[in-house]
Amino acid sequence: MQEALLQHLICPTTREPLRLQVEQRDGDDILSGRLSCETQESSLPNPDSYTIRDGIPDFFSPAGSQTQTIRSFAQKWAKHHYYRAHTHKFYTEWYLQRYGFFESAKLRAFLEGKEFILDAGTGAGRDAANFAELSSAAVYGVDATREALTIARRDISHPRIAFVQADVNRLPFPDAFFDFINCDQVIHHTPDPRAAFDHLGTKLKPGGSICCYVYRKKAVIREFTDDYIRDRISSLSVEEASEVCEGITRLGKTLADLNVTVEIEQDIPILGIRKGKIDLQRLFHWNVMKCFWNDGFDFFTNNIINIDWYHPQFCFRFEPDEFRAWFAQGWEVEAWDVQEAGISCRARKV
Ligand SMILES: C[S@@+](CC[C@H](N)C(=O)[O-])C[C@H]1O[C@@H](n2cnc3c(N)ncnc32)[C@H](O)[C@@H]1O
């Protein structure tokens, strides 16, 4: 991590500045060392201090009730080394559309003049890389799992990006620090998504913007099947869960290969099924069980996307109105997108 970016980190417990002791560096890149609370005596029995390993400072404490969910992501990222490269274009286009940018030039214009950006729950760092490329800001990519950040740092070496291991509920940054916070597809995996959202809000400058996505509640049969499968596989390792999910992924492919469109002639409100023409695989996927399939990805990636859904224990879903209510006070909504999969909101802190 670049030394210039390290200086903005604070102790998430005491909120004090941190003193850097360098063990190993490569020019301005601090590879290993220690960050300790400036005001605490190092002779104290347990001074707050944080290690830097392989260029990544570690502020993450054992995850409590989120342990299984974090382990699930750790195993997922360790298992899928080329996820970002394989899916970058698809997810970037989806991102631009959901948050009302539609093209990277508009995202570039939005990012202009921003000094500090946080990508909270950065995973393999796709969005962080896009933000650095399209702006002149310092970009912090934070994630709870070291495996994700190790891959991100391996693939993305940009002097204005710093990867930090920390909890989105306990961020090592001063309040009102960031001009823009991105938290895409993350907080629904935390024990209390609303609390995580509020914590993120404290780290944003007044006038700053947030982009946040949460899963949407699905039709009743799909909700039932999701919970049923999750209850049974979340205690398995990702390895074992991936075997269970293979059948589901193959079913998604089989249905997609049929290339059949069906017409639902009438709404079925009791099951949450809406009338209209729909591809058979989509009908099944949205209303019966998640069986993701995208011809543009290989089988392994499609299967990981299904595991990513079924395996983490925490996977909250929201009605659009519930999520919208989070922005009722203190926010001005600038883009709002509701899809079957999830709800995306870009808002300005007022
Ligand atoms: C579905 S992935 C999304 C990653 C990335 N935002 C993207 O769009 O590709 C969710 C990520 O959130 C991270 N995460 C979950 N809970 C977290 C927490 N409490 N603090 C920080 N990161 C967390 C996981 O480790 C995982 O990398």
Image (cartoon, rainbow, N blue to C red):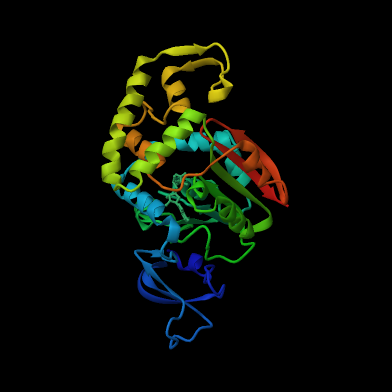
State the image quarter where residue 291 is shown: top left
Q: Is residue 54 above or below residue 231?
A: below
How many numbered markers are drawn?
0
Query: In screen coordinates, is 193 left or right of 144?
Result: right
Q: Point out the residue furthest to the front here.
A: 270
Q: Position of residue 318 (x, y in %)?
A: 57, 40
State the image quarter where residue 280 is shown: top left
Picture residue at 54% right of the left edge, 55% below the top? 118
Q: Is residue 297 above or below residue 326?
A: above
Picture residue at 44% right of the left edge, 85% below the top? 42
State the image quarter where residue 296 is shown: top left
Q: Nearer the viewer, residue 4 or 10?
A: 10
Q: Position of residue 350 (x, y in %)?
A: 73, 52
Q: Nearer the viewer, residue 270 or 83?
A: 270
Query: In screen coordinates, is 44 left or right of 32?
Result: right
Picture residue at 45% right of the left edge, 86% below the top? 44
Q: Nearer the viewer, residue 116 or 242?
A: 242
Q: Is residue 260 above or below residue 46?
A: above
Q: Quadrant of the N terminus?
A: bottom left
Is residue 268 visible from the viewing direction of this image?
Answer: yes
Q: Position of residue 176 (x, y in %)?
A: 64, 62
Q: Position of residue 220 (x, y in %)?
A: 51, 30
Picture residue at 39% right of the left edge, 15% below the top? 259
Is residue 137 visible from the viewing direction of this image?
Answer: no
